[in-house]
Image (cartoon, helix red, strand yellow):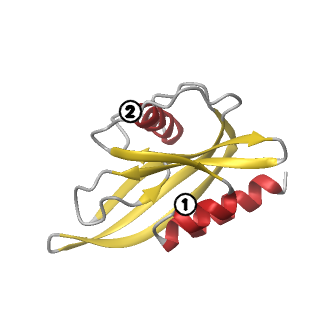
Amino acid sequence: MKDESFGIIPFTKEGFKYKFLLVQRTADGENGGHWSFPKGHKEEGESDKDAALREFKEETGLQDIIILDDKDFVEQYFFKKGNDMVYKTVKYFLGFMGSPGEIKIQTEEIRDYRWATFNEAMKIITFGEARGVFETAYKYLTSK
């Protein structure tokens, strides 16, 4: 079985430091309560980027974000759902927020959020696959 999601690695810049917005999922399901980035499933007719933007806006309540380039970063992993093994891919885009504004989390899906530096985020993000894709995205961002 396959499952596909689309998300954004949101960031802003404070002085010379990048800060990244992490969200904590609600505690439903086997992996509930984990920390990662805003993401979700595509709706009929949406492009990958449009799905990522919609999910970001739904989960954070934030509107002003600019997708950086057309570069994407893909996370891949397997997980068990009932008796089935699911092959999951998550395609992320880097999203710049000049002035983030007030976050209004979607409480049905998000329990908490946090702004973090790269080093802080690497400690907070729950799963190794997500940390790996974040590290790749960070290297891309800081090489520009």
| Disc 1 secondary structure class | strand
Check the image and report above or below for 107 versus 142: above
Q: Where is residue 13 in the image (x, y as percent from the top left)?
A: 75, 41
- Determine contact: label 2, label 1, CB under 8 Å: no
Q: In this view, does 91 lie to the left or right of 71?
A: left
User: Sequence order check: which comes first, mark 2 or mark 1?
Assistant: 2
Which disc number belongs to residue 74?
1
- The residue that label 2 is drawn on is 45
The residue at 77%/41% (across/down) is 14
Which label lies toward us, 2 or 1?
A: 1
Q: Which quarter of the figure has residue 35?
A: bottom left
Q: What x and y, as percent, mark residue 82?
A: 15, 70
Could you classify mark 1 by the number of other residues whose Cα lies within 10 Å: few (under 14), some (14-19), or many (20 or more)? some
Vertical comparison of 86 with 12: above or below: below
| Circle 2 SS class | loop
Name the residue: 38% across, 32% down: 45
Which of the 4 image quadrants contains residue 100?
Answer: top right
Q: Which of 106/140 is in front? A: 106
- Residue type at numbered disc 2: Gly
Q: In which quarter of the image is residue 64?
A: top right
* Amino acid type, mark 1: Val
Q: Give the quadrant of the N terminus.
A: bottom left
Q: Position of residue 72 (x, y in %)?
A: 62, 52
Q: Nearer the viewer, residue 37 or 40?
A: 37
State left or right for residue 44 relative to residue 36: left
- Residue 78 on image: x %, y %: 36, 73
Residue in the image at 30% along x and 65% along y: 31
Q: Please identify the residue farthest to the left as the structure is shown.
A: 83
